[in-house]
Image (cartoon, rainbow, N blue to C red):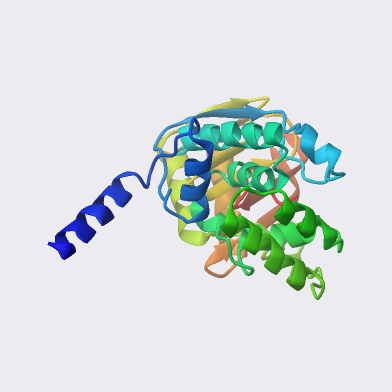
């Protein structure tokens, strides 16, 4: 009987693992922080968000810019829920929660990117953002409602004091490959295939498209078809090796517009 009850509890957890309810702040944040909100919502839509959070400015943390304008090919509802939770965190002044939730949205809502480990992509991003000021992590840890997030920020404070901002970049012509904002290679192949099979045209925006934990983004508004985007993704995948990909193609051409920067990475805002 005990085994059956445990199994039933496990099944219930799985059933609730995919969706988060932004109307229940504490519960939703706990699901996310403990990686129970796995998976994607399986929907397509445009994400547009100003990224202006007053509480970040109140704490002199304006370097955390979460302006978003991209297409989510498979996770629209989840990203919107994350942004709703981020707005609630802003109203509460919980900047630790806010940075986590807004960053989660900027990563397309994909859990793998946002693991609360000191070697995760999320951790690497934060270490870059703090500009060697580890007091940022003290602010974040003191202003979070979640114990796991608090512990994560405290651990990063220790790591940040020893951190050297090396991105292991390798340049070859106009291409740059790095470990920063990296996406799983298989996810980028899926993004490539999805855009190949579902053609669309982007007319002066949005400037990013995310699917299966990988995002393609470009630096300026232009009218571009998915065929050109697929070509650039393929070039990045052939140029940058490894199981994870973060590729910046500088000064390329999109629909006869010169000087565009094209990025294949794990974030909707590109390789910034």
Find the residue positioned furthest to the bottom.
Answer: 162
For the residue pair 13 and 251, the one nearer the viewer reads as: 13
Total marks placed: 0
Q: Is residue 252 above or below residue 55?
A: below
Q: Is residue 255 above or below residue 148?
A: above
Please provide percent x and percent y for residue 68.
67, 34
Find the residue positioned furthest to the left.
Answer: 1
Find the residue positioned furthest to the front.
Answer: 2
Q: Residue at x 27, y 48 (%)?
A: 12
Q: Residue at x 84, y 43 (%)?
A: 59
Q: Residue at x 73, y 57 (%)?
A: 126
Instruction: Decide if residue 174 is on the left or right side of residue 36.
Output: right
Please provide percent x and percent y for residue 110.
51, 49
**Residue 188 in sight from this viewpoint:** no
Q: Is residue 147 above or below residue 40?
A: below
For the residue pair 142 and 164, the one nearer the viewer reads as: 142
Q: Which corner quadrant of the image does residue 93 belong to? A: top right
Q: Residue at x 43, y 48 (%)?
A: 37
Please provide percent x and percent y for residue 18.
38, 44
Instruction: Decide if residue 226 is on the left or right side of residue 269.
Output: left
Instruction: Decide if residue 60 is on the left or right side of residue 191.
Output: right
Q: Which corner quadrant of the image does residue 242 belong to? A: bottom right
Instruction: Decide if residue 172 is on the left or right side of residue 38.
Output: right
**Residue 161 in sight from this viewpoint:** yes
Q: Which corner quadrant of the image does residue 94 belong to? A: top right
Quarter the N terminus occupies:
bottom left
Q: Is residue 40 above or below residue 240?
A: above
Find the residue positioned furthest to the top.
Answer: 203
Please provide percent x and percent y for residue 15.
29, 45
């Amino acid at each position: 009987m005990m085994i059956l009850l445990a199994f039933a509890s496990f099944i219930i957890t799985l059933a609730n693992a995919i969706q988060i309810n932004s109307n229940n702040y504490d519960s939703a944040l706990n699901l996310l922080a403990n990686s129970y909100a796995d998976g994607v919502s399986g929907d397509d839509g445009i994400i547009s968000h100003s990224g202006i959070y007053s509480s970040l400015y109140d704490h002199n943390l304006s370097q955390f810019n979460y302006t978003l304008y991209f297409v989510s090919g498979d996770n629209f509802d989840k990203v919107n829920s994350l942004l709703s939770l981020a707005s609630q965190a802003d109203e509460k002044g919980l900047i630790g929660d806010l940075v986590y939730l807004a960053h989660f949205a900027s990563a397309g809502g994909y859990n793998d990117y946002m693991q609360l480990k000191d070697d995760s992509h999320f951790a690497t991003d934060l270490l870059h953002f703090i500009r060697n000021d580890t007091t940022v992590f003290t602010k974040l840890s003191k202003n979070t409602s979640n114990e796991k997030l608090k512990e994560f920020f405290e651990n990063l404070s220790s790591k940040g004091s020893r951190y050297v901002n090396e991105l292991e970049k390798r340049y070859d012509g106009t291409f740059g490959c790095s470990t920063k904002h990296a996406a799983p290679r298989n996810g980028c192949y899926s993004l490539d295939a999805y855009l190949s099979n579902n053609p669309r045209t982007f007319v002066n925006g949005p400037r990013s498209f995310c699917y299966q934990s990988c995002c393609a983004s470009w630096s300026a508004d232009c009218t571009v078809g998915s065929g050109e985007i697929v070509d650039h993704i393929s070039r990045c995948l052939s140029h940058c090796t490894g199981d994870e990909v973060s590729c910046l193609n500088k000064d390329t051409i999109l629909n006869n517009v010169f000087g565009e920067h094209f990025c294949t990475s794990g974030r909707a805002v590109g390789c910034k």
